[in-house]
């Protein structure tokens, strides 16, 4: 019995985001007061947003 999975989507961890300036947005993990915070930073213009989707 051939079962074809419909969940063929690739892992979302490989998703890439780009800043309007053309630079690639990288996720970075920041430790602040014992808490882990995820920040998105543009490699090129150093713009920082909370979420990669905020760059659009
Ligand atoms: Zn940028």
Image (cartoon, rainbow, N blue to C red):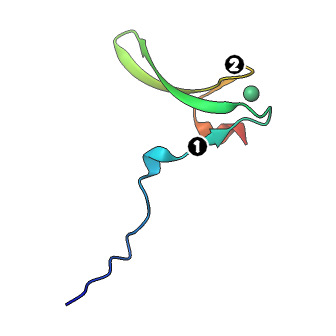
| Distance CA(mark 2)–CA(mark 1) | 16 Å
Residue at left 38%, top 76%? 6
Residue lying at the far top in this picture: please name it: 33
Quarter of the image holding residue 25? top right
Which residue is label 1 attached to? 16
Which residue is label 2 attached to? 46
- Asked if the residue at tag 1 contacts the one at tag 2, i.e. Cβ–Cβ closer than 8 Å, the answer is no
Callout 2: CB less than 8 Å from ligand 1: yes
Q: Is residue 21 above or below residue 48?
A: below
x then y, percent, for residue 42: 66, 26
x then y, percent, for residue 49: 63, 28
Callout 2 crowding tier (Cα within 10 Å): few <14, some 14–19, many ≥20 = few
Q: 5 or 32: nearer the eye?
A: 5
For numbered disc 2, what is the local secondary structure?
loop
Quarter of the image holding residue 7? bottom left
Residue lying at the far left in this picture: please name it: 1
Callout 1 crowding tier (Cα within 10 Å): few <14, some 14–19, many ≥20 = few
Q: Quadrant of the C terminus?
A: top right
Quarter of the image holding residue 53? top right
């Amino acid at each position: 019995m051939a079962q074809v999975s419909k969940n063929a989507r690739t892992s979302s961890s490989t998703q890439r985001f780009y800043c309007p300036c053309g630079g690639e947005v990288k996720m970075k993990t920041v430790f602040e007061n014992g808490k882990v915070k995820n920040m998105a930073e543009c490699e090129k213009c150093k713009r920082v947003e909370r979420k990669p989707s905020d760059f659009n």
